[in-house]
Every structure is written in structure tokens, then in C-alpha cells.
Amino acid sequence: MDRPIKKPRRRRGVIIAAAVAVVVACGVLGMALLGGVKSSVRVPMRTVTIETAQPGVFHDFVALRATAQPKDVIYLDALEGGQVQEVTAQAGDLVKVGQPLLRFRNTELELDVLDREGRLVESITQLQAYEKSLEDSRVANAKAAAQIQYDITRLQRTADRRDALATKGFISKDLHEQVHDELDHDRRLLPLQTASNAEQDALRRRQIPQIRNELAALQESLKVTRSKLDSLVVRAPVAGRLTDMDIKIGEIRNRGQRLGQIVADTGFKLQAQIDEYYLSRVRPGQTGAVTVEGRDVPVRVTRVDPQVKNATFQVDLTFEGAMPRGLLPGQALEGRLTLSGDQPALLLPAGGFLERTGGDWVMVVSGGHADRRRIKIGRRNADQVEVLSGLKPGERVITSDYTGFEKVDRVVLTK
């Protein structure tokens, strides 16, 4: 009988092993190929902007968008407050120095001022009376000394005459002795009066300056006290335009409350917000220009505020020469601030790519794709970027926004 003959198992095993080897080799080859492929994204060419790096002159400036602000703004606050009795000026009016703007009524303050004024006047009167008493005492002492001196002179003459009469026996001994006793008494009294006068005069000379200083202080206090009533009338401290004042008769305003403000007639300054990138390069004294009614007006930096807010810092600028006419508070002006002189450099037009890369890398176009490349940039302005390394003249770069390019190495440009 016929029976099936089995094939050897060895040949089948060799075939399986060969197949496995082929699969492994393909996997290794595939991994090698995949490892060399860059991560990429496909974008239509019409959606990107491509510029060429070229040698040129770098204009070192920063764009300005400034607003006109008054140089001096004077705030009006209520020094005493009270009920508004009269309003004599409104917001928008041009006012002169010392012009009354409004008047308060404050009965409590008026009574307090009257009371303090009365006490001060009483103290002044007492000091003046004491000063007068010192002067009266000085005069009285001087009169007393003069009277004693006069009595001595008079008695001396009388004594001389009586001495001559006494030697001839024409007068009694009592009359002769009486005049000499009076003369001796006045002679002893004169030094005492003179010493007393000197002591009181020295005391008076010490007290008079003190009294006068106290009188001056009281007079100043009286002046300040009376000025409190003057504070009920709010006057313009400077000439200018009154703004931000909306006050009605009858309303109550407390002491220290803001009433309004005056924009003084001292002209305008400019305030501009500049990107923090330029903080280390902007300093007082730098010059630039802003456009006013179609013409360039020179300006100069006067102050740089180093505090960064919302990625910007503030600078103040003043006009060089005559100030433009017709400026309004808050008016926006465009211009440029010069940072240094023009210099030759390899330039790339500024674009949206700077926001995503910070200038650390770009996508360099070659054929139908663009590859990531690290570069180093220097100065930049609103129009130009100075390329220090990483690019050669003539190379093309995508300069539009890099949103979506952050994690890819290649941008495939499609039609």
C-alpha cells in the first residue's frame, strides 16, 4: 500500500528563522530612517512672509508714541471745609492768580476763631502793659536819681551860704546843722538810688527782648488764626485753566477733600511708554523728534522711570526750543527717539517672529522648506534687526508670526 512520506522538519525551521531575520532587519532600517527625519509642519507659502538678510545701515532708534501732559498741575484741596456758600468759577474757565473760586460757610470755625482771637488779643495786651510798666519804672527811677542830684546841688549852695552866716553869728546853730543833715542824707541816698536804677535797668534789658519775641509769636498766631477764616474762600494759587471741579451750592465738603485742579500756563511735557528691551539704552539727555501737524519737532529725554509695568517703562520728554501751539492734554504724538549713530550691519526686517523666538532662532528658507537655526541678534528698532551671527547675506528667513513653530524643526512650504 502507498503511504505519505513526511518532509524533514529542519528545512521548515530554517525558513522561519530567515523570515524573522528579515522582519528584524526591516525594523532596524525603519528605525534608522525615522530617526533621521525632522519634526515638521506644513503651511501654505502664501500665509508666511519671507525676507532676505542683507547688509545695510542700521538706524538705532526706538519708536515713540507719546501723550502730551501739562508740565504743572496744581491740586485744589479744602483747607477747612464746610458748606458751599458761593461758586464763582467752573471747570474749563481760565483763572488768574488769587481769583476767588468758591466760598465756604463754617459757623463752628468762625466761633472758634473768634474765641482764640480774643484770648490772643488779651495775652498781647497783658504783655504790652507789662512792657509799658517796665518803661514807666525806668523813667521813675531816672527821675528819682535826678531829684536827689538836684537836692544835693541845692542843699550844697544853701549850706555854703549858711556857713558864712554862721561864722558871723547871724543864724542859729539849728538852721546850720539842719541843712548839713539834709545834704548828708541825700549824698548817702544817691549811691543807693543809682545802684537800684542799674539793677532794674539790667533786668529790663533782659526782659524786653523776651517780651517782644512773645509779642511777635502772639501776633503771628493771631495772623494764622485770622487766616483760617480766609481759608473759607478758595483762591487760584496760579494762573491757568480750572479742571475737574464740579461743586454745587449747599453741598458739604470736608477738610482735605479734593475740590479740583488747575493746569498751569507753563506748557506741556511728553510721556511715552517704551518696551523694556530698551531700558538699559534709554537715558536722560537723548534726543528725538515727534510729528506735530505734519512737521518734526525736536524733543529731549528729561527723566527715565526704571520701574517696568506691563513690559514697558515710562520716560518724560520736553520740547527743544519753541513749544508747538494748539497742543491739548492727552493728545497722542508719534515720533522716534535716537539711541546712537547709524552703523553698517547685516540687517533683517523686523517681524512677528521676534515675539516667539526673542531673536534666538529663525526658520531659514531653502527650496520648498525652512529649517530652524540658532542666531544672535544685536540692536533692533521698529523696522530693522541687527544680525550678529547665524545668518549670511542673501539667506532668506520667515519673518512673520511663528505661532505653531515652537516645537518643530522644519516648516514645509506648500502651494
Image (cartoon, rainbow, N blue to C red):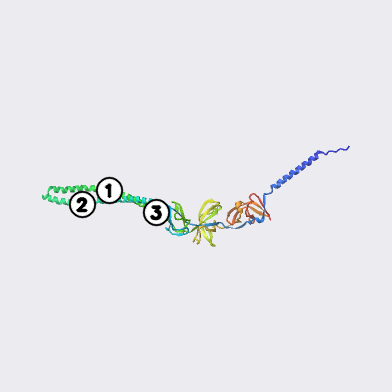
Identified by mark 3, the residue type is Leu
For the residues labelled 1 and 3, the Cα–Cα distance comes to 43 Å
What residue would you read off at disc 1? 200
Q: Nearer the viewer, residue 212 or 118?
A: 118
Identified by mark 2, the residue type is Tyr
Secondary structure of residue under mark 3: helix
How many numbered marks have been drawn onto this rendered protein structure? 3
Give coordinates of residue 280: x percent, y percent. Answer: 54, 52
Secondary structure of residue under mark 2: helix
For the residues labelled 1 and 2, the Cα–Cα distance comes to 22 Å
Of the numbered discs 1 and 2, the one sitting upstream in the chain is 2
**Residue 304 as seen in the image, left or right of residue 157:** right
Mark 1, other Cα within 10 Å: few <14 / some 14–19 / many ≥20: some
Would you identify the image quadrant in which residue 8 lies? top right
Position of the N terminus by quadrant:
top right
Position of the C terminus by quadrant:
bottom right
Residue drawn at x 70%, y 47% as measured from the top left: 34
Image mark for residue 229: 3
Mark 3, other Cα within 10 Å: few <14 / some 14–19 / many ≥20: some
The reply to whether callout 2 and callout 3 are in contact (CB within 8 Å) is no
What residue would you read off at disc 2? 150
Residue 73 in sight from this viewpoint: no
Residue 363 in sight from this viewpoint: yes
Identified by mark 1, the residue type is Gln
Give coordinates of residue 59: x percent, y percent. Answer: 57, 58
Front of the two marks 2 and 3: 3
Of the numbered discs 1 and 3, the one sitting upstream in the chain is 1
Residue drawn at x 75%, y 42% as measured from the top left: 21
Mark 2, other Cα within 10 Å: few <14 / some 14–19 / many ≥20: few
Secondary structure of residue under mark 1: helix
